[in-house]
Amino acid sequence: MNILNEWKTNISRWDEAVPLGSGQCGCLCWGTPQEMQFSLDRTDIWDKTILWEQREEFTYANLVKLAKEGNVKKIREIFDAPYYYPTPTKLTAGKILVHFLKETGEIHSVLSLKDANARMEFGNEENLYKVNAWIHALEHIGVLEIYAPEDSFSLELKTPDFGEKGTEKEYIYKEEKREISQGTLKELKYFPAQWETEGILQWFCQPVNEEFSYGIIMAVDKQPQKSRVMWKIISSEDGKDWIEDGKKAVLCAMEQDLSLFFETHRKWWEQYFQKSGISIPDKFVEKQWYMTNYLFASASREGCAPMPLQGVWTADDGTLPPWKGDYHHDLNTELSYSHYLKANHLEEGKCFLDFLWGLKEEGRHFAKEFYNAEGSCLPGVMTIDGKPLGGWPMYSLSPVNQVWLSHSFSEYYRYTGDEGFLKERAYPYMKETGIFICDLLEEQEDGTLQLPVSSSPEIHDDTEKAWLTPMSNYDLALLLNLFGTLEEYALHLGDPMADKWTQVKEKLPGLAVNDKKVLMLSPDESLEESHRHFSNAMAISPLEMIPYEEEGKEIIDAVIRDYERLGTRQWVGYTFTWMAHLYAIQGNGEKAAEYLNIFWKFFCGPNGFHLNGDFRKKGYSEFTYRPFTLEGNMFSADALQEMLFQMKKGTIRLFPAIPKEWREKGTSFCHFRGEKGLMCSGKITNESISWEIQADVPQKIRVKIQEKIIEKALEKGEVWSGCIALEG
């Protein structure tokens, strides 16, 4: 695998920059020769200051009361207002500028995915200047190698352009002023950064509030023809001697042989990309899958905080990041961690589960304080430490988003078969979620259980109509999935709670389906407008509760036809990937590939970043803005994987949804992860499908190809190689 991403001219925008990342730290490389910009970021650099006063009315009981009264104004004043304040928010860390003041022209940039190395060059044959940039995969130390005469350039370390302490203003909530980005960095009022130098080191310490400060340490070794710059982002949360420890780490790296230092970095990325792979005739599509996996490892790593909305690449345009760069759980975090299991990148993805597990106590506190319930629930829109940020409360405070989070634990167990994880993490986490939901459910006259209010992200925005007749198919699908899974796990582990979960599951109503076999929004409302969230179809994708057979086939086909009927004018980027998912389940490879191509070509920047809107204005959507988020990237990779390999309840479908051209010219994948730790590689040509399957635990496997089903019982570690001729 030797994939390159190339920029032939100067990059003028931060969101089109060359992206580098180590899971903890990120760098965006862009600009001109006169000002080469290296925008630096770290996932856990946050201003957690809460400016809003939590009112007594900020409770679920009051939200339910106001929703039933239809009091939209009061709901916004109490529950949406907190999001209006500039903090809490994710922060960008700072930047390094390299100035070649006498040089003009265009920078040619190349990103090598296999070693996560950005190479930039400009000038002419007589004066050719080169800059290499990378972030060490293990040490989280950034490196700039500058191949140029030492007197031809200057360096500058800069802090973000924050506001000044003492110039605070009073914030008065105005619902009409609610924006994607809540103003500029000037809204954040801090004491000036403290600057220091020592030998080859220079650094700043930026106070954020009484509890938190951060800084960037830069070391410069200028030599006649080749200079070296190293940097590290440090935080007061790193330990008592955080500045001294950071200085030592940078100096230690500077003393190492650079080629050996780079080799350990290169080796990490080599091993990462060996975990899985694909080969597709459409090389553009193939490249996007690898680019997405590159972005994933750059933004998510074991031992680090999981990726928020923008991962390790917070906006560098003088504004606060889109949606504060926070953690949204009504789709964003879940889809961001949708593809890693099948792609066999467990270590990089598990950090999300470790993060949620570490916030159990915060979830218990929020469940008790806001919902007056036992168990555990995190806010649907939250800070890095699990505090509520407010926002449209039918989504930002929907209790069912916690169920989607808990589903991430069951998926990890499904794909690994790790019994220790099931017993120690998955079941305990889901059990607390189940206890929490049980405290909210109300029994109706007909004996069914339902939530007091219901919604479906993000239909009807934050208007009175957004409160759907309980229960929405979004809520129901997640609850049916939760209690069905809890029942299964409790029986497996011998937990006497199994009877409780069964009783709850059996008292939940069925999913609402209209006379056209389309999954509805709620029992009395069908989707009748183009909309970005396919939340009414959660039971199909991503929960996979409805198989594509018999009545399920009728429903899935009807849902797809309905989305086609309603059109794409209110879609955003990730919606196209969701539609590709549905087409993959349907077995429609031509359409799945078409919608993935639309996503990657028209809703992503040249660096692969999902920019949400139809920013090139090609007519695919009425949203033409460009706020960057990552969930669309990861869900697109998952959709492509679904086209190549599907496994559910022991049945494998190989190449279930690929275009005719891919079959004719040959397509393959290697080391995709299936259920219970199973590993699968496959290849298809116009004549045959071959496979190699290895079981991690003993299990019976069924391979379904066209109308044929082949079964085999595999022992632990046994490899099953097979081949079957294709018909037609």
Image (cartoon, helix red, strand yellow):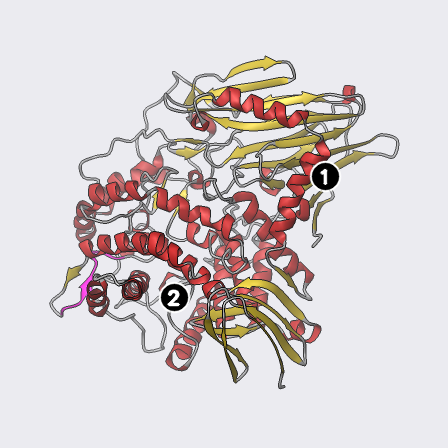
Disc ID at residue 260:
none
**What residue occupies the far right of the structure in this picture?**
126
Residue 268, percent across and down?
62, 45
Specify start and end residues of the magenta stretch as a single range: 447-454
Residue 25: image quadrant is top right
Viewer-side residue, 677 vs 104: 677
**Residue 259 is inside the magenta segment:** no
**Residue that carries the numbered disc 2 in the rendered image:** 537
Q: What's the residue at 85%, 34% (across, down)? A: 124
Disc ID at residue 119:
1
**Amino acid at circle 1:** Arg
**Amino acid at circle 2:** Ala
Whether 364 is drawn above or below 601: the answer is above
Looking at the magenta stretch, what is its main secondary structure? loop
Whether 206 is drawn above or below 504: the answer is above
Q: Can residue 533 be seen?
A: no
For the residue labelled by badge 2, is the local secondary structure a helix, a strand or a loop? helix
Q: Can residue 88 be seen?
A: yes
Image quadrant occupied by the C terminus: bottom right
Residue 362: image quadrant is top left
For the residue labelled by badge 1, is the local secondary structure a helix, a strand or a loop? strand
Image quadrant occupied by the N terminus: bottom right
Judge left or right: residue 610 versus residue 5: left
Residue 389, percent across and down?
33, 39
